[in-house]
Image: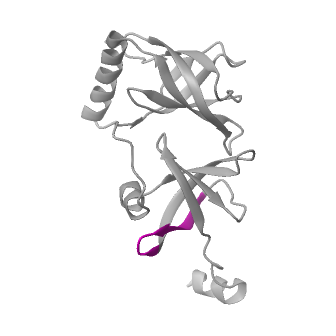
Amino acid sequence: MWDRIKEFFVGGEGPPIIIEPVKFEDGLLRFKCQEKLKLKATKLYAPSKIGHIEVQMEVLSYDKEAELYRGKMKDETFALDAMQMGKRKEFRLETNLPFLTEDVKDKRGVTEDISLSGARLRTSQALNPGSFIGIELKFNDPTIDDLSLRCEVVWCAPTRKGQFHSGVRFFTIEKAQKIVLKRFIQNKVALGM
């Protein structure tokens, strides 16, 4: 009832907000939008083979320099298929895994997700795309040794919480390290975490 009253006085939702998808990487959709978006969950429309489709998007960051937003989609498999965008073949585990690094002032951060070839990191300050950083993943599990990895920063953007998230690729990862990482991911998936 309240929604109907609000719509009468304020008006409907307004015209649909149409985005221009650029690329799907690191579990996020990079896209452009003519309208300025707030960093929050919102309903957007994306082009597809059958016209525009509604996409529920958690808009996470905006890169002013590249004029690109990054967001996490609900029903991502359906949306990516409709937009004819490929999804990476490698599994990404959404997990908040602490890590230590000498490359930020407070010397720590947390992963947002991780795969066998890279991760999305959250830190208190920006990381420079193209630079290399060292991280020590802290598994907080007595059966899994912490991992020290060298990473290449692929992208970085500010989040709405005054932090930064960055996509990194593991630059040098040895076979033994990959086995440890794979075991961690498999254990988390098996436990439904």
Classify residue 80 by image quadrant: bottom left
Quarter containing the C terminus: top left
Quarter containing the N terminus: bottom right
For image coordinates 39% across by 50% down, the residue present is 86
Q: Position of residue 9 (x, y in %)?
A: 71, 87
Q: Position of residue 140 (x, y in %)?
A: 42, 17
* Residue 28 seen in render: no
Residue farthest along the right direction in this orientation: 65
- As for residue 117 lying within the magenta part, the answer is no
Q: Position of residue 13 (x, y in %)?
A: 63, 78
* Residue 186 seen in render: yes
For image coordinates 55% across by 67% down, the residue present is 43
Frontmost residue, 145 versus 86: 86
Q: Is residue 129 above or below residue 3?
A: above
Main secondary structure along the magenta-highlighted residues: strand
Q: Is residue 72 above or below residue 82?
A: above
For image coordinates 50% across by 68% down, the residue present is 47
Q: How many numbered discs sit on the rendered protein?
A: 0
Frontmost residue, 24 versus 138: 24
Q: Is residue 144 above or below residue 2?
A: above
Q: Position of residue 12 (x, y in %)?
A: 63, 83
Classify residue 185 by image quadrant: top left
**Image-based side of 94 in relation to 68, left or right:** left
For image coordinates 71% across by 51% down, the residue present is 67
Classify residue 94 by image quadrant: top left
Residue bounds of the magenta highlight: 41-51
